[in-house]
Image (cartoon, helix red, strand yellow):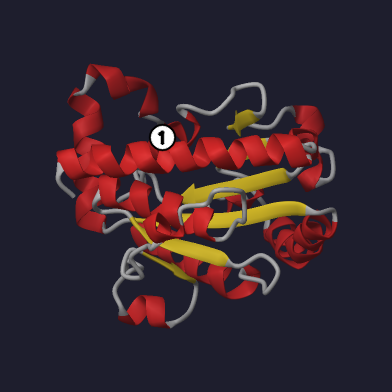
Amino acid sequence: MKKNIYKKELYKLQVELVKFQKYVIEENVAVCLVLEGRDTAGKDGTIKRFTEHLSPREARTVALGVPSDKEKKSWYFQRYVPHLPSAGEIVFFNRSWYNRAGVEKVMGFCTKKQYKAFMEEVGSFEQMLTHSNIRFFKYYLDITKKEQKKRLEARKTDPLKQWKLSPIDAKAQKMWDAYSKARDDMFNKTSFIYAPWYVVHTDDKKEARINIMKHFLSLNDYPDKDKALLVYDHDVICKFDPVCYEKEMIAP
């Protein structure tokens, strides 16, 4: 996507997001977005553009670090519950409880028993969220192996992105196939009718950001909604289905 087109589209969509937040605050709506995906897929940048012009008092980003010893001994979902949105809030999870289905499983940070328990419980947990009238959305940002390698190399030389480098990043390419298998298992077992996964192809960061915003806003009603603006590209974002593989929206 060309930069001038991206900037024009982004501005219009951020105006829509401000309209949406005003509605959320006035009507006491609770909104939760989970953004998962491979390393370098663009989660940080996407959330930044979402929240750039929203009121920071009612829009929060949650990016939890390594759990403490106490948290490791608690119910797995317990550390996430305090960060869920209250009425009038929009909360973005930059990675979430799905760490257990991805990096923890691949890197051996959890046991097989813990992984199995998570996969059995996550559906009930998310059903409770939706039954509590939380508007809940799950986005998985996917990227090709070639593009990931390019972005990982760029991080090594960009002084403004040094903070993004981690030991886990260094293994992203080596463990590619294992991450793919964990991702596919997660899609097949946790894309629920009441909480489906939406898959986003992010090799073009600008195009991905624009389409996630359009898709998210298209699923929500709010006053003065510009429906014509919110037509998204089905070749960039789709509700999880085996056809996503056929369309090459999910990297092998």
Could you tell me residue 149's position as x and y percent?
A: 22, 47
| Number of numbered discs visible in the structure rendering | 1
Label 1: which secondary element: helix
Q: Mark 1 points at which residue?
A: 49
In this picture, residue 51 sits left or right of residue 130: left
Q: Nearer the viewer, residue 206 or 179?
A: 206
Residue shown at 69%/32% (left/top)?
67
In this picture, residue 87 sits left or right of residue 152: right
Residue shown at 84%/58% (left/top)?
128
Tell me if residue 53 comes above or below residue 203 in the rendering: above
In this picture, residue 160 sits left or right of residue 91: left
Choose top left, top right, bottom left or bottom right for residue 141.
Answer: bottom left
Name of the residue lying farthest toward the top: 159
Could you tell me residue 110's position as x and y percent?
A: 65, 50
Q: Nearer the viewer, residue 20 or 246?
A: 20
Residue shown at 52%/48% (left/top)?
35
Label 1: how many residues lie within 10 Å, few (<14), some (14-19) or many (20+)? some
Q: Which image quarter is the C terminus in?
A: bottom left
Identify residue type, mark 1: Arg
Could you tell me residue 81's position as x and y percent?
A: 79, 40
Name of the residue lying farthest toward the front: 224
Q: Is residue 103 visible?
A: no
Residue shown at 76%/67% (left/top)?
120
Choose top left, top right, bottom left or bottom right for residue 160.
Answer: top left
